[in-house]
Amino acid sequence: NPLAQLEEEKREHDHKMKKMETEMEQVFEMKVREKKQKLKDSEAD
């Protein structure tokens, strides 16, 4: 059934995109935290 195949592919694609989005958000959070830490460090000087 080609339609079921398409549905399955769409689901997999959506899942991949969500996963990528989550990873991007995590990387972003990490960078923000590092920046804040650097700011704190430079203020401490």
Image (cartoon, helix red, strand yellow):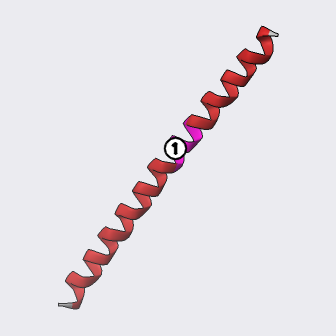
Amino acid beneath label 1: Glu
Residue at the left extreme, as displayed:
1
The kind of secondary structure element at disc 1 is helix
Image location of residue 39, percent across then percent down: 74, 20
Please state which of residues 45 and 22 is positioned toward the viewer in this rendering. Answer: 45
Determine the main secondary structure of the stretch shown in magenta. helix
Work out whether residue 31 or residue 4 is closer to the camera in this orientation and state it.
31
Q: Position of residue 12 (x, y in %)?
A: 32, 69
Task: Find disc 1 in the rendering and name its residue.
Answer: 25
In the displayed structure, would residue 41 be above or below residue 23? above
- Residue at coordinates 45% horizontally, 48% vertically from top-left? 22
Residue 20 placement, left or right of 3: right
Magenta stretch, residue numbers: 24-29
Quadrant including the C terminus: top right
- For the N terminus, the image quarter is bottom left
Q: Quadrant of residue 42?
A: top right
Q: Residues within 10 Å of mark 1 (few under 14, many from 20)?
A: few
Q: Is residue 28 magenta?
A: yes
